[in-house]
Image: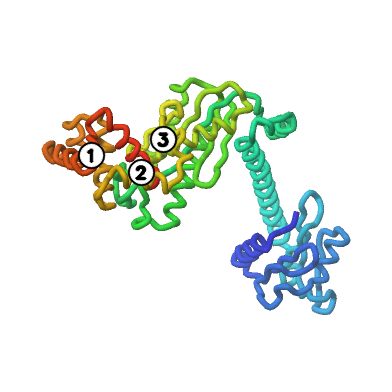
Amino acid sequence: MTLSIKTAKIIVEEISGIIGRQINMMDAEGTIIASTDPVRLGTFHAAAKKIIDENLNEITVHSDSEYRGALPGTNIAVRFKNRPVAVIGVTGPYTEVVKYGQMLKKMTEILIRDEYYKQQSDIDARIKNRFLNEWFYGSPETIDRRLETQGQSLGIDITVPRRIIIFEPVLKIGYSEKNASPPRTGGTAENELRPSDIQRYIDNTWKTIGTMIRHEAHAAMLISGNVFICAVSSRSDKQLLDLAQAVCTAVESRYPVLLAAGMDAKTDDYRLINSARLKAEKALKTCLRSPSKEPRLYDTINMEIFSSEIPDPVKKEYITRIFKSYSEKEIGRCIGILDVFYQEEGSLTKTAQKLFMHKNTLQYQLNKLKKQSGYDPRSIRFSSLFYNAVHFYRDLEH
């Protein structure tokens, strides 16, 4: 374990302000890595090097010529696991500075120990993340005894059947921290929130999800890009949906975030974890396309199962063919109407209410669409054409 320059600087700055003395911090090579005197940075301190090499507790320097690069003062070994890893020096007469010696030593050793545990925690987290990546994204052939053994060493039994939930946060439009009740429409708030605010909300969202999922049986979690992949013990669709909704509610009640969630289809074969993740991803994409961002189960989606296989240019051409002679702006307006119209099962009254539109205006727009496209959006025969167009448009928009 070595003392970082950052930690050394913090110690020197904080302590010198308290005791009013010149302080130096030397590394295991005897080089001054932090000092109240900038001129001495990077220079060699022979007394510190002697302490390290000979495993001494301290050296008092009485004159400038006694040790190269050392001024009169006391130099004390900073230990980690009973070995000197750094030296802290306080310039001044021994009788005046010795009283600070043990205090400085203990404080520095505590900071080094804390830094060590943080580094170990970071290493453990990276090892676990690599394992989770290999597990969640691996094919059935790679889910073998080696992976099982590696999981056991990390406290994860991969043979337990699990369900997958994938969460993705969407910042609410028009939110500012002065708003008591942010609107529930999806989108971004980049015009009103600084990047630091956005990152803070995302970090807090991850923490909330992690806190709730961590208490679930056989939980395993991985942040991958802008999504949070959660594996929990196998359960019914209703139980899984209840858990996802509880997490979404907890996040949305605290932060200006709509939390989209997609869930897999139930299987008891633990080797199909990658397939489960892919299904949860498709369900998540469907959730993200929906204005309400309600959590979606894979078994409740339909054409989304294969839509990812259709190239974007084909989707765009399909939309253009359906909406003949419509401008892009007009297509967008029609899509908005049709989206709500089909959500409300073709009810003119409910659709008009939801769109804040007069019922006669809605009928006019639908009749106009029938005349220009040649297809009646209210006809069972042609409704699938428009439903596909709505889905492709949302897919391209997303």
**On the picture, is 109 further left or further right than 64?**
left
Nearer to us in this view, 235 or 314 = 314
Which tag is nearer the camera, tag 1 or tag 3? 1
Q: Is residue 12 above or below residue 380?
A: below
Return the disc, 3 or 2, that comes first in the chain's sequence. 3
* Element marked by disc 3: helix
What is the distance, in whole Å, between disc 3 and disc 2 at their CAs?
Answer: 35 Å
Q: Residues within 10 Å of mark 2 (few under 14, many from 20)?
A: some
Q: Which mark is residue 374?
A: 1
Number of on-image labels: 3
In the picture provided, is 87 more to the left or to the right than 266?
right
Question: Which mark is first along the chain, 3 or 1?
Answer: 3
Q: Is residue 220 visible from the viewing direction of this image?
A: yes
User: What is the x, y in percent for residue 300?
Assistant: 41, 27
Amino acid marked by disc 1: Gly
11 vs 207: above or below: below
Q: Mark 1, residues whose alpha carbon is within 10 Å: few (<14), some, or many (≥20)?
A: few
What SS does tag 2 mark? helix
Relative horizontal placement of residue 115, taking residue 57 as reference (left or right):
left
Q: Which residue is mark 3?
A: 248
